[in-house]
Each structure stands twice: as structure tokens, then as C-alpha cells.
Amino acid sequence: MSKKRIWNPYTFSLGLFLLIILVLYLIAFQVPVGKMAVITTFGKPVRVINEPGLYWKAPWPIQEVYHFDGRINVLESKMEETYTRDGKNIILITSTFWKIKEPLKFFTSVGSKDAAERKLVSLVRNYENGVIGTYELSQLINVDKNR
């Protein structure tokens, strides 16, 4: 009778390899080029990372990583109708370019890119209506080819 092995060394090696990969996945994270990260411990921000690279953290229940784009973001509004000082209506599309410079301040005051864009849309709309309303349509549009 041949003696059977209780464990196979190949299966054991594969299981150990998968366990190591899982542990690394839980405690390591990457900050890509052009991104920034804020690490929180039990919901409180404790560290800001502005440089790309591989970093370490405690597993998920203890620490969590929030990534933010450090490049210029473009927010384009939908077509909106507004009125000039002389009562004429015009349709505008506005583009807003914005960038996160301080990720910790951004995280504590706004939280996410979607929330920031909602706030920016309302701010731009208010300024847009206020500024356009101070001009007459003839001041905004030039029909003279020589000018």
C-alpha cells in the first residue's frame, strides 16, 4: 500500500501565493501620475499624498484611501437661456476649468468630484446670469465686419 500525502506541495504553494497577494492587496495602494490621495483612519484624514508611487496603509476597516485627480478638470454646462439688460434672451454654454490644489481641504469641505461639480454649476450659473444681465445684446454681438 502506498502512503498518500495529506497535502500537495504545489497546492500549498499556490494557496500561500494567493494569500500573500490578498494581503498585499489589502495593505498596499498605488497613486498614479496626476492623482493625489487622502488617507483616513476611522474616517478622519491623517495623511495626504501628492506624489505618484506605491504606498502602504492599514487594512480597510481601519484606513481608507480617497483618490483625487490633480489635473485640470473641465466642466461644461448644458445650454441655458438667460436675459440681457435690454430683455433679449440668449442661449449660452459655459466651460469651467478647475483643479484641486489642496486635496485635504477639498476632502474636508467638498468630499467628492461630483459634489464639487454641483457646487460649481450653481456658482457659474449665478455669475453668468449676473454678468450677462448687465450688458445689452448689441454689446455682446458684433455685426460689423470691419470691427
Image: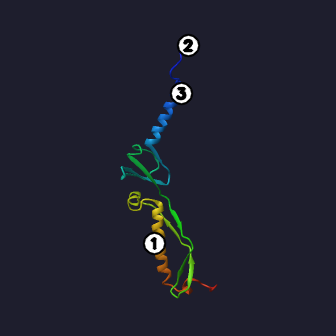
Which image quarter is the N terminus in? Answer: top right
Upstream in sequence: badge 3 or badge 1: 3
Measure the alpha-carbon separation of dots 2 and 1.
80 Å
- SS class, disc 3: helix
Q: Looking at the image, which is closer to me, 13 or 31?
A: 13
Q: What's the residue at 49%, 83% (across, down)?
A: 133
Give the amino acid at mark 2: Ser
**Can you identify the residue that label 2 sits on?**
2
- SS class, disc 2: loop
Task: Single out the residue that lies furthest toward the top.
Answer: 1
- SS class, disc 1: helix
Q: Is residue 53 above or below residue 146?
A: above
Task: Single out the residue that lies furthest toward the bottom.
Answer: 86
Give the amino acid at mark 3: Thr
* Label 1, residues with CA under 10 Å away: few <14, some 14-19, many ≥20: few
Task: Judge depth for marks 2 and 3 and give the one in front.
Answer: 2
Say whether marks 2 and 3 touch (CB < 8 Å): no
Which image quarter is the C terminus in? Answer: bottom right
Residue 12: x %, y % from top left: 51, 27
**Can you identify the residue that label 1 sits on?**
123
**Can you identify the residue that label 3 sits on?**
11
Q: Is residue 39 above or below residue 24?
A: below
Q: What's the residue at 50%, 31% (across, down)?
A: 15
Give the amino acid at mark 1: Leu
Measure the alpha-carbon separation of dots 2 and 3.
20 Å
Residue 142: x %, y % from top left: 59, 84
Task: Judge depth for marks 3 and 1 and give the one in front.
Answer: 3
Say whether marks 3 and 1 touch (CB < 8 Å): no
